[in-house]
Amino acid sequence: MAGTHVIVPGFTPQSWLEVVSRERITRAMLVPTMITMLLKTDFPEGTDLSTLESVLYGASPMPQAVLIEAFQRLGCDFCQVYGMTEAAPIVTFMTHEDHRAGMSGDDADAAARLRSAGPPVVGVDVEIRDPDGTRLAAGQVGEIVIRGANIMAGYLGRPEETAAALPGDGWYRSGDMGYVDDHGYVFVVDRLKDMIITGGENVYSTEVENALYRHDDVLEVAVFGVPHEQWGEAVHAAVTVREGTSVSVDELREAARALIAPYKVPREIHLSQEPLPKSGAGKILKRNLRAQFSFAESASQD
């Protein structure tokens, strides 16, 4: 391809915009939290993104509202990959054509598929199964299981974890929750360990996050469950808001209530202007937030 890789030591919206403009970048890879940060940034005068042809995103679910705004503002194509290290690493791929069809507004089904991760790539099979291992029908939520020559042989020196992920039937248990539509597109709704069960009802964090992301003053959102004496778990949200905003918890809660069922609306919303904790790959660390706010909730109940 005679292409050049440009590696940056760390991500900030300003430095990314500068590098793309200066180096005439044609293709880039970003995670959704980075794209959200870009969209909340005023582009400096002289920023030139005209060479940017495509942005590939992955690593965590992309809020549909963020994707649509990114498509409009960055002025380039988008594609998505879903996968994990254990699958070396790609499982599904959402093409440029899929994104364009969804953005056009001409096809409701195509627009709905913007929330998906695309269909499985060639040579990879995906099924959705219940806890007993039964294959579920299209539209039913269960664990995403994967089969293909790309799947790992196991975890080095960790036989118990290997047996849990690879029980011997040729399928890898991903630990992700999702469903497949009638066209074979895979929708990832949550990590199995992140699903919230409150009052006997399942709440998928990505649905709640999508609702909160619709508010213009929201920069980042993480939704997670914390222990609760009455409901088993309570839905909590940590939200980073735009600097100088006057948005309130009640305003965000009412905005979410207009989009999702009342039992899914966060019981507590914690507002801050500080970035949420992230891994080196840019994924929001919900385990850190869950530990922090579980301790706070336990202390308040005591």
Image (tube, grey):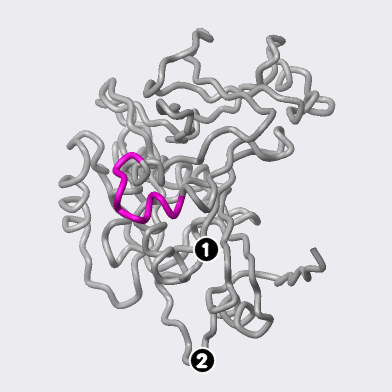
Q: Element under label 1?
A: helix
- The majority secondary structure of the magenta stretch comes to helix
Chain-order first, disc 2 or disc 1: 1
Disc 1 marks which amino acid?
Met
Q: Is residue 66 above or below residue 143?
A: below
Q: Is residue 186 above or below residue 221?
A: above
Residue 160, by quadrant, is top right
Residue 46, numbered label: 2
In the rendered image, which residue does mark 1 sit on? 34
Given residues 59 and 54, the one toward you in this image is 54
Q: Nearer the viewer, mark 2 or mark 1?
A: 2
The magenta stretch spans residue 107: yes
Given residues 283 and 151, the one toward you in this image is 151
Where residue 237 appears, x then y in whole percent?
34, 48
In this picture, residue 228 sits left or right of residue 259: right
The magenta stretch spans residue 148: no
Residue 116, by quadrant, is top left
Q: Residues within 10 Å of mark 1 (few under 14, many from 20)?
A: some
Where residue 130 appears, x then y in whole percent?
47, 14
Specify start and end residues of the magenta stretch as a single range: 99-109
In this picture, residue 130 sits left or right of residue 236: right
Residue at image point 41% right, 46% down:
114
